[in-house]
Structures are given as structure tokens and as C-alpha cells.
Amino acid sequence: MAALISTGVALLTNVLLALQTWNDGEKVEFKVLSIVLSVSSLSTVVLVWRRLDEIPTPKRVAAALIISTFVAVANFGYQYIFQPYRREATPLVQLNVEKAVLSADRKVLSVPVDIKLVNHSDMAFYVLGAEFHAMGEVVKVSPRDLARPKWREDAEQWARYREKHPLTRREVYQPGKLVAAQPWIPAGNWVEVNDESLTRTVVQLPSNTNFRKLTFYATLSLARKDRLVLDKFGVSRYSWRKGNVPSWMKKDQRELDTIIQTAEMQESNAIDQYTRKKRHITTYWRFGAHGVDVLPVIAPVGEENRTLSKQTNREVVSRYGLTDVLAGPVEETLDEIKTRR
């Protein structure tokens, strides 16, 4: 009886291992090994089962024990492994514009901006990239409604930019100008469970600027800490110094300068760590006239230049919990900022 129960548990373990390896594993040798183990365990269970004639109703007892063990293992896996893996969580980023300060020579206006990161979830996150930027706008308002051709032209321009300017019948569209841009959390840091952090940055511009409005944005690119193990990012590479920019990015970057950072990563699941190919996580910081786009890419070593399908990208995002948190636009008129001080 003890032998039957032991071989039944071994069979269950090997079958579950084979299913996981078949679904997530990429190395063929581990798939073959898991199937061989499952078949061997099944044959062992059958052999032991045939030698239980000496015990009264042994098969009923054995079936009850094996089924109850299977239900217990399945329930444990669902409650403590599958459900937490599927549970979604996203931190919150808040922007708060403080009182402006005029320099002693009254030539420079400094606008402090507080960036608060709040994580009230029970998930921790790795920081892949965090960028803050401010845009200055010279707003022109027409005394009458814009003509339909002009309004349509503005609508086409409005849809091209990541910063969505107001689209109205009176406000004449003008693309904003970048005033400040900088990272506000170092890449490679992490956000702990139930954690809060505050970062202050200062935007400076001439006191006699012709901007009528300032718009502030903060972006945060994250990966869930329970789904991967991330090492520190290595030395940065630059597209203008023969940095390796993938061919699929060259088609869309429109001559944008790019900073490339790469870090080694491991699977959070020990089985996946052995049965899947080794991967790197690479972040591409693409600089343009409207701040910086941070694009994280997770790909097997040696396949970073391969174009991934949309389905593959969705699977990578879901598997590793990649998420982007956006804060803004927070718009302040320059008159309001000056009056506040």
C-alpha cells in the first residue's frame, strides 16, 4: 500500500511537470525527459496495483488516497501559485506642482515638481525606466471658431504626438517645446510592497519666457518582481557610437537617438529557469522632441534583433508583468505659477 501511494504521488508530480514543461519549456531534452518520467511512473503504478490482491479492498483505499492527494495538490497550486500569478496590480504616480521661486537676479524662474510613487498592492516591482519631462506651450486662441479645414489639420497633428494637446474649435494647435527631461528613479531599483517614495525635481526657465502654459508628465516602466529576477544594468551603449539597435526599431525610430541598457535576468520559477532559454532584458531610451520613450524588450540571448509578432509581445508582457504607469498631463498656466509664489 505504501509503495502504491508513493508511486501515485510520483506519477502525479511527473505529469504536472510534463504539462508545465510542455507549455512553457523551450529545450527539447527536458520535454523528452519529463515524458519518459511520466511513462515510467505510470508503468510502476500499474505493476504495484496488480500485486495488491492480498489486502481486502486495496484498490478502493488506494484510489481514495490517490484522488484526495491529487485534489489537495491541485487546490494548493491554484490558490497559491496560479491565482497570485494572474492577479494584476499597478502602482500610482502623482504629480504636484509647488510654489515657484525667482532667482536673486530675477532672471530665472524655478518651478519645483514633486513626483510621488505609491504602491498599495501586495506586489513588488522592478524599475526598468522612469522619465520626467515638462513642455512649454505658447497658446493662441482664435476669437471665432476655426475653419473646418484648419480644425481637421489640427486633429491630424494632435494624433501624431504622445502629448495630447487640447483639441478645440478656438485654440490654435501648436506643438509644445521641451523644457526639461530627466530620469526620476534609477533603472534597476525596485518598488517594495506597500511602499511610498517622493522625488522632487526643479524645472528652470527664463523669467521673461513667452510660454503661457507648462505641462508636466512622468512615466514609469515596471516589471513584476514575482515573475523574474533582474540583475543590475550594465554599461550603457549609444546608437550614435555604433550601439546595436535592432533592425525592427530602425524602421520606426525616425532617426531618433537611442541609449541602450541590458541586464541579465532569470525566471522566477526554478523549473522554467532550467527548461527555457536564457534571456536578457534590454531597455531602449529613444530621445525625441517630446521627451523620452522607454521601451523594454525581453528576448532570448542572440535573438534580440529578431522581429517579434504581436502575439509574442502580448505573451511576454503578460508573463513577466511588464507595465507602464503614466502621470499627466498636469497643466499649469505660467500666470498661475507666478501668482502662487
Image (cartoon, helix red, strand yellow):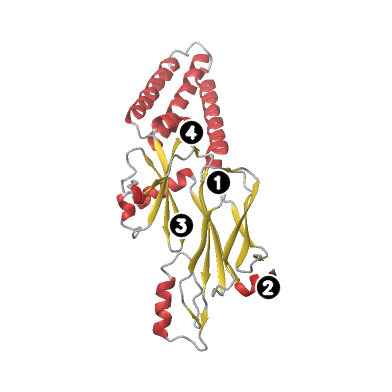
Q: Nearer the viewer, mark 3 or mark 4?
A: 3
| Image side of residue 63 versus residue 47, left or right | right
Residue 269: assigned label: 4
Specify few, some or many for label 1: CA neighbours under 10 Å numbering under 14, 14-19, or 20 or more.
few
Q: Nearer the viewer, mark 3 or mark 1?
A: 3
User: Does any portion of residue 294 appear in the rendered image?
Assistant: yes
| Image side of residue 279 versus residue 191, left or right | left
Specify few, some or many for label 4: CA neighbours under 10 Å numbering under 14, 14-19, or 20 or more.
few
| Relative depth, front residue between 250 and 17 | 250
Say whether marks 1 and 4 touch (CB < 8 Å): no
Q: Nearer the viewer, mark 2 or mark 3?
A: 2
| Relative depth, front residue between 66 and 268 | 268
The amino acid marked with disc number 2 is Thr
Does residue 61 sit above or below 203 in this rendering?
Answer: above
Does residue 166 sit above or below 323 in this rendering?
Answer: below
**Secondary element at image label 3:** strand
At which x and y percent is residue 299?
38, 42
Residue 61, image quadrant: top right
* Residue position for label 2: 339
At which x and y percent is residue 191?
59, 44
| Image side of residue 92 versus residue 10, left or right | right
The amino acid marked with disc number 3 is Val
| Relative depth, front residue between 85 and 110 | 110
Residue 212, image quadrant: bottom right
Spatial separation of the CA atoms under disc 3 and disc 1: 30 Å
Residue 292: assigned label: 3
Residue 87: assigned label: 1
User: Does any portion of residue 1 appear in the rendered image?
Assistant: no
Say whether marks 3 and 4 touch (CB < 8 Å): no
Spatial separation of the CA atoms under disc 2 and disc 1: 46 Å
Lower sequence index among marks 2 and 3: 3
